[in-house]
Image: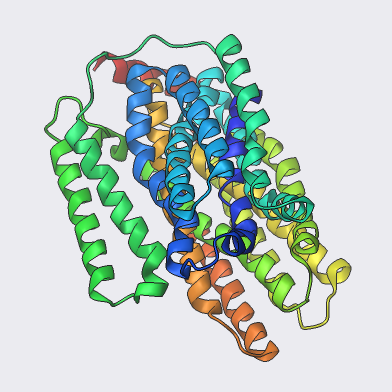
Amino acid sequence: MAIACAAAFVVFLDTTIVNIAFPDISASFTGSGRDALSWVLDGYFVVIAALLVPAGGLADRFGHKRIFLIGVAGFTAASLLCALAPTLPLLIAFRVLQGAGAALIAPTSLAIVLDAFPPERRATGVGLWGAAAAAAAATGPTLGGALVELNDWRLVFLVNLPLGAAIVWAGARRLAEQPPRDHRLPDLPGAAMLAFGLALITLGIVEGNDWGWTAPVTLVGFAAGAALLVATTTRSRTHPRPIVEPALFAHGSFRIGNLGTLLFSAAFFSIVLGNVLFLTTVWGYTVLQAGLAALPGPATTTLVSGPAGRLADRFGQRVVAVPGTILFAIGVMVLRSAGAEPDWLGLWLPGSALTGVGIGLAFPTLGAAAVRDVPDDRFATASAVNAAFRQVGAVLGTAILIAIVGDPATLADALSAADGAYLFAAIASLLSGIVTLALGPLRSPARTAERRSATAEA
């Protein structure tokens, strides 16, 4: 559990920590355009989204431990290369390699957690894993700000080295490996089609603000990505070894959990960046002060996620996730009421704490719902699909936030933009809760075991 959660922490830390170092990176590569510099961030997100599902399929076939350790070793080596990169093109290339390693880690680390827990306690395991992931994403701005102020942007990559080395060493010694399910390669053309389809859709979302949402290049990217995903789905129905088995989508909990994850991810990641922008532009905080001011949220998330998983194991995911989405929306509306005068103790602290409780209740529980009814030998694939929905939701929420905020010229414009951004986050969270209401009741362990046995025999 500790090994898997540590790996999740490292991967999700890099989804936000580099954002804070972006101005310092820009200053190091003077003369480079904004579009080129943005690929330091975008390359990582696009590659993760593209490779998550193929990585999960490979892990289910060739072993969770093996793919996990390859991913951590590759991610750590790429982090070192990023820190040493002498030019912007090399930094972008190494960030792409880092994203490929992260795509191997995210689904396999969750699959390792699911392997370790009996069916009736898996929501607890997913809750703990989700606590590590959410805490990492939310504390990235604080740690990134501190490291940049201590030295420069290269430290945000070097911090991964001791963590990655420790995870590889401990994982090689302590993790158990299930025998490979099938030594034959999965549908590689289908995997490539899926990867390119997800990459094109993610690219369109990431670049939509710069290219224009109705620009031909954006629309062609979306259309081509959607066509590839449809073609992959059609191919998977007839291929003997599809990269994603269509039977997974027959589970209502899988469909609902993934859609709820996408919507809540859009809400969560929009405020991760939105909070930093508000605190630095409206309240005039430094980046480090803004990161410290936001800490109560992830701290609360970490405390709540474990007990939330145990409650979900006992009463079902719907009972836990729906109140979480509501509390998150309430907390966001508290933050939305902030004015130009700083009021951290009276306003920001309670609002941040409420959003933290909501994240701890909803985020990992939605992930647990998505894998609740899938067969044991499909954990990595199902986890990867859920992670892909989460990643697309993250880039979608960030893109919408940037579109709403724009480049305000006055304080009044900044406050108006913040109102719109926080309203979007609240609405997305509530929509996630509405979707989650459709989750069915939790099956008893005996019925779940019966169903799994029947599925295995079939």
Q: On the picture, is 444 further left or further right than 282?
A: left
Give the image quarter of residue 185.
top left
Spot the residue most to the right.
Answer: 345
**From the image, which quarter does the N terminus lie in?**
top right
Q: On the picture, is 57 further left or further right than 131?
A: left
Residue 257 visible in the snapshot: no
Percent x, y for residue 411? 70, 88
Spot the residue most to the left.
Answer: 238
Residue drawn at x 56%, y 78% is 405
250 w.r.t. 172: above or below? below
449 w.r.t. 259: above or below? above
437 or 414: nearer the eye?
414
Residue drawn at x 63%, y 36% is 160
Residue drawn at x 52%, y 28% is 72
273 w.r.t. 133: above or below? below
Percent x, y for residue 55? 37, 32
**From the image, which quarter does the C terminus lie in?**
top left
Residue drawn at x 47%, y 62% is 38
Give the image quarter of residue 344.
bottom right
Give the image quarter of residue 22.
bottom right
257 or 106: nearer the eye?
106
What kind of colouring is applied to the model shown? rainbow
Percent x, y for residue 51? 36, 40
